[in-house]
Amino acid sequence: MAAITARFSGRRSGGAGQQRTQRSAYLYLVPAFAVMGLITIYPLLYQVWMSFTNTELQHLNQRLGLVPDFVGLDNYERILSSALAIPNFDFLRLIIYNLWWALSNVAIHLVIGVGIAVLLNSKGLWFRRFYRALYILPVVIPPIIVATVWANMFDKNAGAVNLLLATGGKWLGLPPETFQIDWLRQIAPPLPWLLPNVEGGPDLALPLAFYAMLVTNTWLGWPLNSVVATGALQSIPHELYEAAEIDGASNWQKFRNVTLAYLRPAMVPYAIYGFVITFNLFHLAFFMSGGGPNGRTEMLVTQAYTLVNNLHFYGIGAAFSVIMFFILLAITLVTNRMAKATQTYSL
Amino acid sequence: MTAVAEERSFIAKRLSGLSLRSSRRGPGLLRQAALQALCVFVLFTVLFPIVWVFSVSLNPLNLSRPQGLDIIPPGATFDAYFKVLESPTANPISFVELTANSLKVALSTSIVSVLIGVFAAYAFSRLRFRGREVLMLMILAVLMLPAVATLAPLFVLLNSIRVELPLLGEFNLRQSLLGLGLAIVSGLLPFAIWNLKGYLDTIPRDLEEAAWVDGAGLHQTFLRIILPLSVPALAVTGFLGFIAGWTEFYFTSTFLSGSVPNHTLALALYSMTGQFAQTPWAQFSAFAILFALPPAIVYFLAQRWITSGLAIGAVKG
């Protein structure tokens, strides 16, 4: 960068040339920033102002001419203390569930993605290219379709998941009524010890819907992890395995000390990227569980949507988005630090 | 291979002949069978939902829900597809009109974002100017926020723009495809700038330097060298933006629910789903397939380029 700029300005004899490059740079930026200023930056600033008001549906009707009141930090206080007039709203639970959702998904994607990449990389495997080509299919389907189709798959009566389980159960002599599982709406948590409640804390029990969405998102998420892992696997020099063999390493030691060591620098940034994507994944929670039962699978993004779309709480919605901004900022700063820490990890 | 490595691998082969099996030609038949069984199981889980939607879409329309797991259901027919093409939802809007609306939104937003974005991406990638870091941080901050978090201000601001038109009556920007397009570009443009900047950073500078030596100016270098070289990145970024617009849901459902002629495929899909939806699953499935197929085919054929583009960034959504 520096070399080029120096070169470029050098041709124009010092200061005047530098100024000309500056002017050209702004020329190239003008279209994008004119558009963004109007429809991105101005709305975001307006959002901050709106978050201090009680803007609701009646204020949007220009014929009524109502002006929203300035309420100071009231919206923020009500959100953070879970004092909104919405059923099942618990801000702390929202954040903990959302973090847990992203973390559990990414961990599973990583393990399965790397596992299948190693499987497909095994020596002498037949039909390797055939499998690789078909395993990518979940990625190419738009998420809105994946979410709505899997919502049907997990239907209590006609869903494919229950029918498949019943078919398997028949061999074990189980009656088909065993598999009338209401995946998306059953309230009782199947594994109450997972993410247990703390005394005085929010009610975190994970309903079946969480596991149903976990399955769906695993189906959706592992293939890209596998693609990234495959790229890293193929960059491992074969001599390393041979050297390890000479040193008498077991298969597990080879996998740990050679394979995983080489996978780590590629997988960590991708896992971080996946974490942020999953943290903000709207479609599954909205179309499959609808945030239910009892708001237990509600995420920040779905709550932000409901506040504006269904409830028309524009002021509260704006405050909610500003809070979301700071949560995501914190996540970005933490993950950036983690990425830097792994960069210095030497092979 | 260097001599040392050659020698080492020779020793390794000798040693492995004694005890370790991994340097043999391939795995034994038993191992191959186990690996194949695993691969087929994974393939089954991948294909199961896809095959299932296809088979459900073949059900006759008088069945509200499928009766079993048959790949070809009893009384299989393409009726659901004809019904979808004719009148997909209870609303008076045809499949062609829905597709046209989705296409208008997706094409215009992706093209506009890429065309405007590439100029800014060039400035960020190649030029040094005052305020560069601040502006880049600003774009990153916007990218960090999911699109749904800008729903409230965009709704209120676009809603406040109303024009009395002669003959046509009142025009409300929020209830129009133009307003929807603006809301989508609001998130898509920062993505396009960032993604294209990431790509331009990977183009080696030798070519530009050669052009400068030959006396080409900044604009000529951009138009004659950078732009032609970045066509693949423009295509990938544009395609990712296209998919985002093609399936956009939050803005569309919030802005346009009340305006049926402007409905898109995503809104129609939404109206067919849910616990209490009356739509037969055959009809929903046929619609979902027709909706997903065009971008899925392009994605599948161009996946090598797209996944390498994905490593740089992703569309907010």
Image: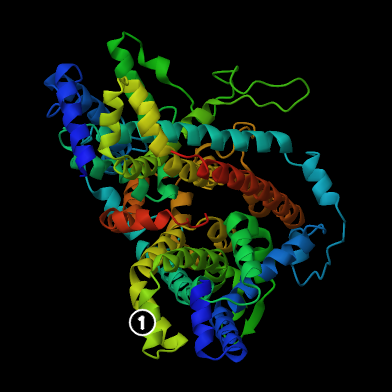
Give the SS element for disc 1. helix
Which quadrant of the figure has residue A45? bottom right
Q: Amino acid at mark 1?
A: Ala
Q: What chain does badge 1 belong to?
A: B
Q: Is residue A8 left or right of residue A224?
A: right
What residue do we see at 33% from left, 45% from top?
A231
Residue B90 in sight = no
- Taking depth in this image into account, of A230 and B186 the one nearest to the observer is A230
Q: Could you say which quadrant of the image residue A173 lies in?
A: top left
Q: Going by the image, does B269 lie left or right of A314?
A: left
Q: In this rendering, would B17 be left or right of A251?
A: left
Type of colouring: rainbow
Q: Residues within 10 Å of mark 1 (few under 14, many from 20)?
A: few
x and y percent of residue A138 in the render?
35, 43
Residue at image mark 1: B210
Where does the image place residue A113, in percent across and percent down from the top left?
A: 38, 36
Residue at image coords 66%, 68%: B134
Where residue B108 appears, as percent x and y from the top left, is 44, 73
The residue under the point 42% across, 58% down is B265
Total marks in image: 1
Q: Residue A154: horizontal and vertical position, in percent?
A: 43, 31
**Residue at the far top in the pictured view:** A173
Q: Is residue B299 visible?
A: yes
- Which quarter of the rendering shows the N terminus of chain B? top left
**B232 or A74, nearer to the observer:** B232
Q: Nearer the viewer, residue B35 or B256?
A: B35
Identify the image quadrant of residue A43.
Answer: bottom right
Q: Nearer the viewer, residue B195 or A49?
A: B195
